[in-house]
Amino acid sequence: MVKVKVCGITDLEDALKAIEFGADFLGFNFYPPSPRYVAPERARQILAELPASVGNVALFVNEPKEKVREIVRYGSFPGGRQAFYGLQFHGEEEPEYCRGWELKVIKAFRIKAQESLNGINDFPADLYLLDSWAPGYGGSGAPFPWSWLEGLRADRLVLAGGLGPENVQEAIRRVRPYGVDVCTGVEARPGIKDHEKLKAFILAAKGA
């Protein structure tokens, strides 16, 4: 069954609802210019209330490695419990930057043209998140042509970009990805989820 990642978590109730509805991963955005940015202190408060079964992903954009490590350490709890399952790098991080992390690495690629996918299979990451290109480092809220993904290893792809309750099943049938990622498609406003849309998205994805 496809995995579901809900990104842009800034609120405990949203996090708990996503888990209740069946989300596998939650994304915490540590890129300060983003309207979905969550301060490390706030993220820690949320993470402390979440079950260990959920995979939490920390998102960064072109951050120095030591800053990433600092936030990851801050998300650790007594007894050795590590709050984060993985790291998502959403900027221009080079292959060497993505090597050597103790956590899973998700490298995001912002797809502007089919050529944006060149060499993706050789990039040192556990998973590849494919998002639509937009100025800056947010998504456009619109899907890119899924036909561009033919020939890629779908079992390592996390599909993002313009997904919502109305089209996620078609996306999964077309691409057969490891997972799907949603943020703006289930929001009431930036950083706050619409729980009805969130539930509809996760149920549709899991039912595809």
Image (tube, helix red, strand yellow):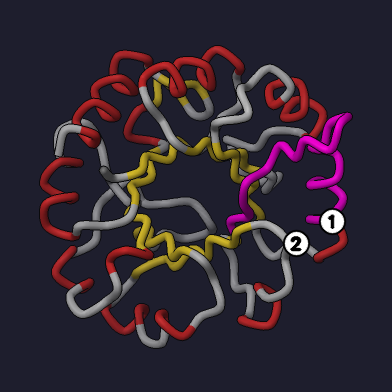
Against 155, residue 203 (above or below) is above
Q: Which residue does the numbered mark 2 point to in the structure image?
A: 63
Density class for disc 2 (Cα within 10 Å; few <14, some 14-19, many ≥20) is some
Which segment did they paint magenta?
A: 67-88
Residue pictured at 65% horizontal, 46% vertical: 58
Kindly indicate whether the residue at mark 2 contacts the one at mark 1 (C-beta within 8 angstroms).
Answer: yes
Density class for disc 1 (Cα within 10 Å; few <14, some 14-19, many ≥20) is few
Residue pictured at 14% horizontal, 39% vertical: 208
Residue pictured at 51% horizontal, 80% vertical: 123
Against 106, residue 52 (above or below) is above
- Circle 2 — which element? loop
Residue type, mark 1 in image: Lys
Q: Nearer the viewer, residue 196 or 81?
A: 81
- Residue 58 shown in magenta: no
Q: CA distance from mark 1 to mark 2?
A: 6 Å
Q: Residue furthest front?
A: 79
Image spot of residue 102 (x, y percent): 73, 61
Marker disc for residue 67: 1
Left or right: 38 as drawn, with respect to 183? right
Left or right: 19 as drawn, with respect to 165? right
- Residue 77 shown in magenta: yes
Residue pictured at 66% horizontal, 54% vertical: 60
Against 205, residue 158 (above or below) is below
Left or right: 56 as drawn, with respect to 168? right
Marker disc for residue 104: none
- Circle 1 — which element? helix
Image spot of residue 203 (x, y percent): 23, 26
Image spot of residue 200 (x, y percent): 24, 22
